[in-house]
Amino acid sequence: MDVIDFRHKTLSRMVQFTAALDRLLKTLPPSLAKNKLQDQLGRSGSSVGANYAESGAAESAKDFIHKLSIALKEAEETDFWLSCLCVEYPEASEAESLHRENHEFVKILQKSISTAKRNQR
């Protein structure tokens, strides 16, 4: 599989992740904790894919690495909020699979940044 195919598949996974996350957040029972989780997790979770998509139009290798680094930060934040969600709402079984998928995004982004930095030298 070439880089473009891998990138397209990863972006597609991120879109599916964001949609599944949005559906999950809508099903949580009402509470103040839910509002905070919905806000924080909704923002960081959707930002991973948005920043990854934006990296495709980077103006330079440095800009590409920067955009991927932002996506990685957002994925790490999403990991935190998903952990909170799993503790707060253990009955939300979909949260565990989203947590695993997000962890895959973290690994993909880490590897992509590492490769881009190596290629920049």
Image (spheres, helix red, strand yellow):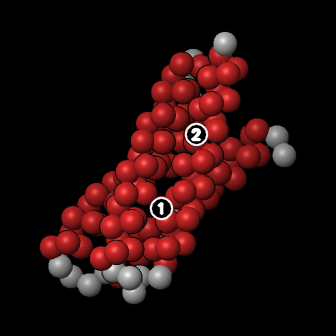
**Number of other residues with Cα within 10 Å of mark 1, as a class: few under 14, some 14 to 19, many 20 or more:** many
Location of the C terminus (image quadrant) = top right
The residue furthest left is 32
| Residue at x 29% of width, y 66% of height | 38
Amino acid on which the number 1 mark rests in the picture: Thr
| Residue at x 76% of width, y 38% of height | 3
Q: Position of residue 70 (x, y in %)?
A: 43, 36
Q: Quadrant location of residue 15?
A: bottom right
* Residue that carries the numbered disc 2 in the rendered image: 110
Q: Quadrant location of residue 56?
A: top right
Front tag of 1 and 2: 2
Closer to the camera in the image, 7 or 91 = 91
**Relative horizontal placement of residue 88, taking residue 118 as reference (left or right):** left
**Number of other residues with Cα within 10 Å of mark 2, as a class: few under 14, some 14 to 19, many 20 or more:** some
Res 27 label? none
Amino acid on which the number 2 mark rests in the picture: Gln
* Residue that carries the numbered disc 1 in the rendered image: 18
Distance from disc 1 to disc 2, alpha carbons, whole Å, reads 20 Å
The residue furthest right is 1
